[in-house]
C-alpha cells in the first residue's frame, strides 16, 4: 500500500474492496500498521484534508544531514564523537517518544458477529458486517482510544480515570462505562449512536465542544458533511436490536418492520403482495426468535410465510 491508498481510506474515498484490502494489509504485519499510523498522523495534522501525495521524506532528510554535517566537519575528533553520541541518544529518545504502540485490528465479514471480541481493558465489542476495529495491544496514558470503521455494539468496562474514546470517520464517542451501538461506515454520509445503558458524549471528530450527551434509550445522528447533530426518535432503539434482540414497533409500517427484522436476524424479507407493506403494526418483543414475530403477523393480519434459507416470503391479502 502507498500513501495515496492510505489517505483514500482515511478520507472515506476507498471502495468496499479497497477497504477490505487495506484492513488485510494492516493485519499482515506491525510494520504495515506503523506505516499506516505515520500517514494517519500527517492526515490528522492537516485537518483531515491531506491530498494523496507522498511527502518527499528522502529530500527532507537530505536537508537535515547537510545541516548537521557542516558544523560537525570543523570539530576536533572528540567533538565529532560526542556529537555522534548525542545524535544517537536523541534518535533513541525520539523513537521511544514518538513511536506509536503496535496496533491490532479485528474484522467482520459479510455476517454480523455472534460472539464478543475482548479488548485489552476487558471491554466487549460485537462487530456488525463489513466492520473493523483498530486498537492497541494495551491501553496506556490517560485514555483508552480505539478506531471503528463500520458498525459495532460496545459494552465498555468502567474506568473513570481512563475514559474510553472511539474515533470514526467523522464522529467520536467518549464514555466511562456503558453499552451502546455506533454506526459510522466510511462510505455513509451519516453516523449515529444509540445508548442501551449508561451515558455517552457524541460529537464530530475534533469538535468535542459541540457534543450531545445521551442516556439510556436515547440516540443521536451526525451529518458528516454539514456537521449537524440531531437526536433520534425513541423507536431508533431498534437499530441495535441485532445485538439486544429488543424490538419495539409503534404504528410502524410492515415495510419498515421488515427492514428492522432483516438487520436484526440477518434475513431477507419479500412481500408477495405489495399492499401488505403499507399495513401498520404495534407490538414489542424481548429477545424472542424471528418465528415469534412472524406468528404475531399471522395472528393480526393472517399473513403466512415461507422460508427458504435466509429468504422469507410473506403472503397475505393486505389489511
Image: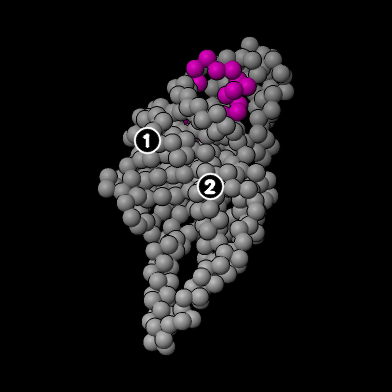
Mark 2 Cα within 10 Å, few/some/many (few <14, many 20+)?
few
Mark 1 Cα within 10 Å, few/some/many (few <14, many 20+)?
many
Report the residue at 35% width, 50% height from top: 143
**Pick the front one: 278 or 191:** 191
Report the span colored magenta: 242-260
Residue 249 inside the magenta-drawn segment: yes
| Of marks 2 and 1, the one in the foreground | 2
Q: Farthest residue toward the front?
A: 74
Q: Farthest residue toward the top?
A: 319
Horizontal and vertical percent position of residue 123: 38, 49
**Pick the front one: 110 or 275:** 110
Horizontal and vertical percent position of residue 1: 65, 60
Residue 79 inside the magenta-drawn segment: no
Q: Which residue is mark 1?
A: 200
**Pick the front one: 166 or 59:** 59
Q: Which mark is residue 46?
A: 2
Asked whether disc 2 touches disc 1, contact meaning CB atoms under 8 Å apart, the reply is: no
Amino acid at each position: 500500500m502507498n500513501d495515496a491508498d492510505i489517505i483514500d481510506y482515511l478520507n472515506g474515498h476507498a471502495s468496499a474492496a479497497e477497504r477490505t484490502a487495506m484492513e488485510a494489509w494492516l493485519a499482515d504485519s506491525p510494520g504495515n500498521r506503523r506505516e499506516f499510523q505515520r500517514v494517519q498522523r500527517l492526515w490528522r495534522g492537516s485537518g483531515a484534508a491531506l491530498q494523496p501525495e507522498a511527502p518527499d521524506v528522502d529530500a527532507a532528510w537530505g536537508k537535515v544531514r547537510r545541516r548537521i554535517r557542516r558544523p560537525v566537519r570543523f570539530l576536533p575528533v572528540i567533538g565529532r564523537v560526542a556529537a555522534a553520541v548525542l545524535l544517537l541518544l536523541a534518535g533513541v529518545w525520539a523513537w521511544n517518544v514518538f513511536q506509536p504502540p503496535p496496533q491490532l485490528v479485528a474484522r467482520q465479514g459479510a455476517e454480523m458477529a455472534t460472539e464478543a471480541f475482548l479488548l485489552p481493558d476487558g471491554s466487549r465489542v460485537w462487530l456488525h458486517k463489513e466492520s473493523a476495529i483498530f486498537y492497541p495491544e494495551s491501553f496506556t496514558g490517560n485514555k483508552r482510544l480505539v478506531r471503528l470503521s463500520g458498525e459495532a455494539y460496545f459494552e465498555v468496562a468502567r474506568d473513570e480515570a481512563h475514559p474510553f474514546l472511539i474515533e470514526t470517520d467523522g464522529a467520536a464517542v467518549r464514555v466511562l462505562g456503558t453499552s451502546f451501538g455506533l454506526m459510522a461506515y466510511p462510505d455513509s454520509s451519516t453516523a449515529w449512536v444509540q445508548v442501551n445503558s449508561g451515558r455517552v458524549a457524541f460529537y464530530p471528530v475534533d469538535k468535542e465542544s459541540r457534543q450531545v450527551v445521551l442516556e439510556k434509550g436515547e440516540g443521536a445522528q451526525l451529518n458528516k458533511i454539514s456537521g449537524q447533530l440531531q437526536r433520534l426518535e425513541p423507536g431508533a432503539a431498534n437499530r441495535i436490536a441485532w445485538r439486544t434482540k429488543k424490538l419495539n414497533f409503534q404504528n410502524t409500517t410492515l415495510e419498515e418492520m421488515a427492514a428492522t427484522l432483516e438487520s436484526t436476524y440477518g434475513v431477507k424479507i419479500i412481500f408477495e403482495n405489495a399492499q401488505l407493506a403499507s399495513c401498520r403494526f404495534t407490538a414489542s418483543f424481548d429477545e424472542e426468535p424471528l418465528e415469534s414475530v412472524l406468528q404475531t403477523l399471522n395472528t393480526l393480519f393472517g399473513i403466512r410465510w415461507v422460508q427458504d434459507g435466509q429468504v422469507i416470503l410473506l403472503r397475505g391479502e393486505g389489511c
